[in-house]
Amino acid sequence: MSERSERTTNEELFKRASEVIPGGVNSPVRAFRSVGGSPYFVARSEGSKVVDVEGNTYIDYVQSYGASILGHAHPVIVEAITRAAAEGTTYGAPTEREVLLAEQIVDRVPGVEMVRLTSSGTEAAMSAVRLARGATGRDKILKFAGCYHGHSDSLLAAGGSGIANQGISGSAGVTRGAVADTVVAPYNVVPEIGDDVAVVCVEPVAGNMGLVLPEPGFLEGLRAACDRAGALLLFDEVITGFRVGVGGATERSGVQPDLWCFGKVIGGGLPVGAFAGRRDVMEHLAPLGDVYQAGTLSGNPVATAAGLAVLGQLDAGAYKRLETIAAALADGLREAISSAGLPVQVPRAGTLVGLHFSATPIHDYDEAKVAADTGLYRAFFTDLLARGVALAPGPYEALFPSLAHTAEDLERTVEAAGHAARHAAQIAG
């Protein structure tokens, strides 16, 4: 569907952007480097769809990388933001909504006792690691290849997602000293944890390598290993928190860590992050303890209003409906792509859907990379986009169906996926 704008085109905007913004984008995950071409520039959105500056409409499975769980421009969220903004957009002083949002997180997630709000998931993860080091008196952190915990220096090693989509394994500008105390292990294997490890950071469902599910016993094994070593366990639930269920991956897995990171959904589409944990750990934070963390815009009154509004819509019934949508999408994609003769894995974790062009299931980052390196995603993505369906422009991202996606959206998506898969098969041919 195309209604060409007389004002500008995607290509023209990208050219202008490239003159004043490095790479033409303000986050590398938005670049089309791994799929070719230039990005579309969104002019507006509603529900399951975005419309670019040329008037092209796309059924959107990016949904701001999972933040827009209700769909774009949901009226309840828009109303909450409008009402809050009219009262002031930032104060530099506490507000009641900060307390209400923290209480919502504590009430929903088993084991969470205290919460500190931030402005992004990166900020949350960086602060949680500092807290873990301060609370334990230890230096080392352990993370898993392909798990992304934001772009702070010590956590960028083997980060998956945006890092992997750029064809790099880390980042220039990160000194050897910054990662000297970072240990990287393969996902789905319980590592040896020494008595010098402060914290083990893990995505309880890995959403930054095309969606990789934890093997039975993996999270339980991490919990037990951390307990033996005296290390803290951190669940990065920036993606899974309030996305896969009322209590996130913690509730679904039955495994409780010591620390959590949240983001995306809790901001209702506005910039919000949070880290949380047991009371005895969180009380090491200033002003109670000697671990310093701060943020001028933390607990922003407009963002907390949006977060409270979205959580108010997410009860058990909403997750049941969203899981039905996700299951229909996953089953439809699997059938459409495999019928075209392509090897495919379409894992699903509740309301999250993954896509790997592989004949065998994916268990870790190395296997995800093999699937990504086939090049099939690029051809599939490009043809699918031309047919009005938008996935993330990189093979290491998950798909994010929303509550706004209709049966008609799913039907059109699956039909387009069949065409795109046949196109990719011909190119690979």
Image: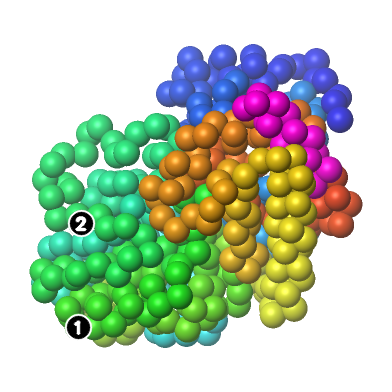
Of pointers 2 and 1, the one earlier in the residue sequence: 2
Residue bearing mark 1: 228
Nearer the observer, 45 or 30: 30
Mark 2 residue element? strand
The three-letter code of the residue at mark 1 reads Arg
Instruction: Report the number of numbered marks.
Output: 2
Front-most of 300 and 409?
409
Q: Residue farthest to the right? A: 408
**Residue position marked by numbered label 2 in the rendering:** 183
Helix or strand or loop: what does disc 1 sit on? Answer: helix
| Residue 399 image position (x, y, % from top left) | 63, 51
Q: Position of residue 31 (x, y in %)?
A: 52, 30
Taking the spot 39% from the left edge, 39% from the top edge, the residue there is 163
Whether 422 is among the magenta residues is yes
Please provide the residue range marked out in magenta.
Answer: 414-429
Colour scheme in the image?
rainbow
Instruction: Tell me the quadrant of the picture where the N terminus can be found.
Output: top right
Q: Position of residue 356 (x, y in %)?
A: 57, 47
Q: In which image quadrant can residue 71 be found? A: bottom right
Q: Which of the labelled discs sits on residue 286, or is there none? A: none
Q: Residues within 10 Å of mark 1 (few under 14, many from 20)?
A: few
